[in-house]
Image: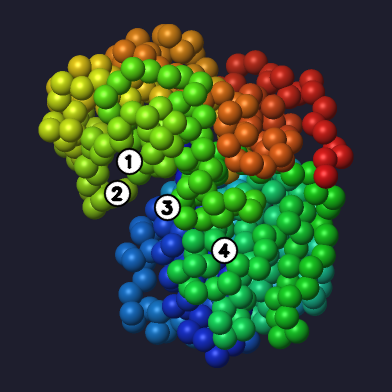
Amino acid sequence: MAGEARDACGVVGIYAPGEDVARLTYYGLYALQHRGQESAGIAISDGQTILVYKELGLVAQAFDETVLQSLRGFVSIGHTRYSTTGSSSWDNAQPTFKTSPAGQIAVAHNGNLVNSVQLAGTLAAAGGDPTPAGARLNSSSDTDLVAAHIARANEGDMREAILKVLPKLSGAYSFTMMNEERLFGARDPHGFRPLSIGRLPGGGWVLASETCALDLLGARFIRDVEPGEMVTIDANGLTSESLARPRPAACVFEHVYFARPDSTLMGHNVYATRYRMGQRLAREAPVVAELVMPVPDSGVPAAQGFAQGSTIPYGDGFVKNRYVGRTFIQPTQSMREQGIRMKLNPVREVIEGRRVVVIDDSIVRGNTTRQIVAMLRDAGAREVHMRISSPPIKWPCFYGIDMPDQDELIGSRMEIEEICAHIGADSLAYLSTEGMLEATQVPKEDFCTACFSSRYPIPIPEHDLRDKHVLESPEHQAQAWPTNRS
C-alpha cells in the first residue's frame, strides 16, 4: 500500500479447558500481526482471577517462553494494536482490564467509536468509582471507555451488563471480551470489522479477526459473528443473541488491502477477490507493456490477475526486505530521505529496458508511489505505468482505519492526471468502484465505501470532521442510509 493508512487491530478469544490457552492465543495473535504492530497483549483467567500481560512491540517481542508459561487458565483474549483512538503507549495497549464489586472484565477491540465524547460525558456525570481499579479511566482509548461502562453496569451478571452497554455504542466494533469464566464476542450492527468463530480439534472455541488465525491453530471455521450479534461461550457451549437489527456495511478495504490473502471474508477467499480485481483492472485500463509487476506484498494477487487479464508477462521486479518493520530505532535523516529503499529494492535485470505496469492496491499521500516510480526509472525502466486496484481514496475513515487527514489524501486534492504528473508515471489508472465491488462477489449494498465516496453509514460528529480537516460536510449528512437491506 503506497502510503500511511494503518491496519485495523487484531483480536482473538479462546475458550478451551484443558488446553494451553495462552500459547493458543499467542499463535492466534501471531497470525494477525499484519493488523497491528504497536503493541500486543493477552488476558487470561483460571476461573477466579483475570491476569493481563501486555507490551509495546511485535507479538514475538512482547512474549517469551517464561511469560507464556506463567499465563495459566482456560479462557483468554488477545489483541495486537495499531492506534486509531488514543496514542501509542503502554497504557493504551490492550486488552483493557476493569473490576467492579460484581466481577472482573477484560476487553479487546478492533474498530473505532464515533460517540466517545458522549460516552466519556455520561461516565463522568455518573461520578464515583466502584473500586480503585473500577470504572475509572486508565487510558485515552475508546476501549477503556467501553470497559468502564460495562464495569459500572455489572450488577452480578457480566452478560447482562454487556447487553446494556453495547447498544449505546455508535461506530465500528468487533470485541472479544471475558470475565472470570466466560468468553464473549460481538460486532456492531453494520459489521464494519470482521470476526469469525472456529472450533478447535479438542472441542474448544476460538474467536478471531480473520480465518487465517483459525487455520494456524488447526481450528475448523464455523461461521462469522453476524453484524449486531453477541455470542457467549462457556461450559454450556455457544449461545447467541441480537444486539440490534443488522445493517451490513462491511469495510471493503479489508478485501482490498487489510486482510491476509489466505483469509476468508464474507464467504470469499481474499486472494481470489484481489486476483479478480486485477483482472477487472486489466479490462478497464489496458496498456502496452512487456512486464506486469506488483508492489509487494499487498499488490501481488491483483498483479497476477492483471497479468492474466492482459496477457502481459508477470515478474517480480522488487525484492522486499522482510526484516524491516516498525522500529523504535529511527533511521538517520539521509536514510529517511531514501524512504522506501529500506523495504524495497528493484531488480535491474527484470526491469531494465522494459515498459512496466506496476500494480498497487492504493495510493494515500502519493509520496511512496513517487519514490517507487523514481526507483524503477533509476533501474532502467523505459516506461512506468501505475495501475491501482481500488478507486482514489478521497475521504478519511472514522471506523477503525487510521488514515491521514483529508488534506493529506492526494486523491482528494488532485485529479488523476495531476496525480500521475506528481508521481512521475507515464500513465495512471484506478479500478472503478463498480469493478472493485463486483470483484468481491458480495452484494454491493453490504459494504461501506466511505473512503472512496464520502457516504458514511453512521453520521460523523462535526468535531471529528474538523479533526480530520474535512472542510465540507460530506454528502452523507444529507443522505438517508438504507435501513432495510437483507
Badges 4 and 2: C-beta atoms under 8 Å apart? no
Tell me residue 105's x, y (percent).
65, 71
First along the sequence among labels 3 and 1: 3
Which residue corresponds to mark 2?
Answer: 325
- The reply to whether residue 67 is in sight is yes
| Residue drawn at x 42%, y 52% as measured from the top left | 34
Q: Which mark is residue 208?
A: 4
Q: Nearer the viewer, mark 4 or mark 2?
A: 4
First along the sequence among labels 2 and 3: 3
Q: Which mark is residue 296?
A: 1
First along the sequence among labels 3 and 4: 3
Residue type at tag 1: Pro
Cα gap from disc 4 to disc 1, whole angstroms? 25 Å
Q: Is residue 54 left or right of residue 155?
A: left
Q: Nearer the viewer, mark 2 or mark 1?
A: 1
Foreground pick, 380 / 173: 380
